[in-house]
Amino acid sequence: MFSSRRTFLQQASLSAFSLWLPKSYAEATSSQLARSTPEAQGVSAQAILDFLEAIEKEKMELHSFMMLRHGQVIAEGWWEPYGPELVHTMYSMSKSFTSTAVGFAVAEGKLSVEDKVISFFPEDLPSTISQNLAAMRVQDLLTMSTGNEKEPTQTVVKAEHWVRTFLAQNIAHPPGTKFMYNSAATYMCSAIVQKVTGQTVLDYLTPRLFQPLGIRGMKWETCPRGMNTGGWGLSIQTEGLAKFGQWLLQKGQWQGKQLLPSAWVDEATRFHIQQPGDDKPDRPKAKNDWLQGYGYQFWRCQGTAFRGDGAFGQYTIVLPEQDAVIVMTSENKNMQGQLDLVWKHLLPALDAAVPIRADLSGLQQLKLGFPKGSESSPMADRINGKTFALEKNELGLTEVAFTQEADQWTFTSGAHRVSCGLNSWHPGQAAFPGTPPRLISGGKPKEPTISKIAAHATWLDAATLQMTWRYLETPHHDRVMCRFEADAVTVTFLNSITAMNPKAKDPRPPLKGRMI
C-alpha cells in the first residue's frame, strides 16, 4: 500500500515555505471549498489509494491532486516541495478560462460567436483579405477550426504584433471545417475580449469569476502589446482549479447566484468538432481522450466527462454524471497514461456500490523523492568556499562559487545564489539566466524572472555534485551538474522539458572555469 512507502511517509515540512505565504492566504483559506470524507460522499477511499500507488508505480510526477464529490473536497494532497499556497503554470489549461471570458462577453452583449474576426481589427488586416479569412468567426477560434494552413503559434509569438501576424497567415481551408490545435487562435480570443471590454482577460474575469469563487493570487503572461496570452500563461492555485471545475459542474452557478448563463456552459463544453485520427494498433479511437471531440476550448473525454488540460498534465476533469471534479497539476509526458489511471481507479470509485474505507492520512505526507547519491565527498573540503573564474559564455556569467554550510550547498554566481539542501528541499528565490524552463517563448519576460525555487544537492560520485532546482510555480525543474577535476569545474544544465526528448539539447552552454 502506498502509505507504507518512504516517499509517501516522509513528513511534509510546508512550514519551511512560510516565506512564500501571501498576506492574503489566510483570507483565501476562509473561502475554501467544503471538506468531507470519501465514504460520506459514497466514494471508495481504497480506490484513491490505488490511484496514488499506480501513479508512483508508473513513475508519474504529480505536484497536486484534489478530488471533489457533491461539491465537497474528499481527497487532496501536494507532493513536497509543492504546496496549496503556490500557484502553478497551467499551459493550455488556460484556454478554458479564456473561453469563459468570451462567454461573459457574449452574455453581456459585447460580442457574438458569429462575429467575424476581421471586424475587430480593421487596422491590422493584410492588404489582401482572402475569402476564408473574411469568413472566420469567433466560434472558429473557439473550436480550433480557423482553417490555417499550418499551426501559426510559433510564427506569431516571434513577432512584435501578434494580432497582425495571425491575420497575415494563410487560411487554406474554409473556417469551421477542419480541426487543428491552434494556441494562437486562443490568443485571438483574448485579444477580442480586450478589444470589446478594454480590459485584459485576467482583469475582466476577476470580478466576474475569480472574486465570486474566492480565487486569489492568479497571474497571466502577456504579449508584447499587453494582452494576456490566452492559450497559455495562466498561473493559479490547485483549489482555484477545483473551484472552476465545480462552477462548471454547477453550470455557471455559485452560492445561489448564476454568474454565467447555464446555456453558455452547456454550449462551451459540448461536442462541436471532431479531431482527426483513427484507431491505432496500441489504442482504439474510443479510448483516446484526444479524439472524443472538442468544444469551446474544452476537450470531451471518454464517457460523459469533459476537461480542460495543459501540457505535462495540468487537468480539470468534470464528471457531470458522477457529480465529481478531479484536479491535478503535474510534470508528465504521458498525459493519456495519466488519464487512463483516472478512468481505471477513480471513476469506478465514484460508482462503488459499497465504498471501502481506507486511511488517507498519507495524502498529508506526500513528497517527491531526491536523486540518489551521497551527502559527502572527498572533494567537498577542496571546493568549499572556493571561487572559479569562468570562460566567456552566452549567459554572461564571470564566476561561480561553492559553499557548504551545515546540511546545504550554496551555488553563487554574481548576484545569483541558490542554496540546496542535502537531505531536504531548500526554499529560496533566484533569477538565474535561462530560467525557468519554458515550453513556449511567447509571453516570456525580457528580463530574467525571479522564481520561487526549492533546491536539493547530492554527490553522484567523488567528483560530481548534482543540484536539482525545482521552479515551484511551474511544472519544471533543472538538473545542474558540477563536475570537478583538479582545479577546474564544468557546469552543465539539463532542464526537465529537454530531458523528455533524448534528441533534444539544453539551450544553455556548459560553463567552464578554473579555481582562483
Image (cartoon, rainbow, N blue to C red):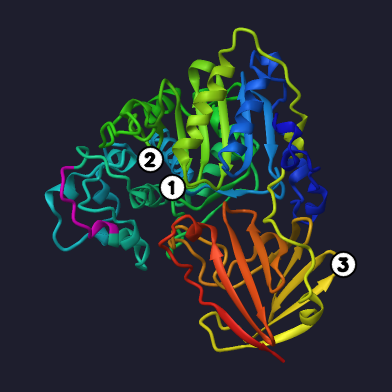
- Mark 2 lies on a secondary structure that is loop
Q: Disc 1 and disc 3: Cα gap in Å? A: 55 Å
- Mark 3 lies on a secondary structure that is loop
Residue indicated by mark 3: 406
Q: Is disc 1 in contact with disc 3, using a CB cutoff of under 8 Å?
A: no
Q: Is residue 350 left or right of residue 9?
A: left
| Quadrant housing residue 285 | top left
Q: Work out whether mark 1 precedes mark 3 in sequence or the reverse, and give the earlier one.
A: 1
Image coords of residue 154 (percent x, y): 34, 60
Q: Is disc 1 in contact with disc 2, using a CB cutoff of under 8 Å?
A: yes
Residue indicated by mark 2: 110
Please tell me whether residue 309 belongs to the stretch shown in magenta: no
Range of residues picked out in magenta = 166-174
Which part of the image, by quadrant, shows the N terminus? top right
Residue indicated by mark 1: 197
Q: Which amino acid type corresponds to the residue marked 3 in the rendered image?
A: Ala
Whether residue 107 is situated above or below residue 135 in the rendered picture: above
Residue at position x 65%, y 44% in the image: 216
Which of discs 2 and 3 lies nearer the camera? The answer is: 3
Q: Which amino acid type corresponds to the residue marked 1 in the rendered image?
A: Thr
Whether residue 478 is situated above or below residue 146 in the rendered picture: below
Give the farthest residue toward the bottom.
Answer: 516
- Is 36 or 335 nearer to us in this picture? 335
- Is 221 or 404 nearer to us in this picture? 404
Q: Is residue 16 left or right of residue 440?
A: right
Residue at position x 65%, y 54% in the image: 472
The reply to whether residue 23 is in sight is yes
Please tell me whether residue 170 belongs to the stretch shown in magenta: yes
| Quadrant housing residue 352 | top right
Give the farthest residue toward the top.
Answer: 353
- Mark 1 lies on a secondary structure that is helix
Q: Disc 2 and disc 3: Cα gap in Å? A: 61 Å
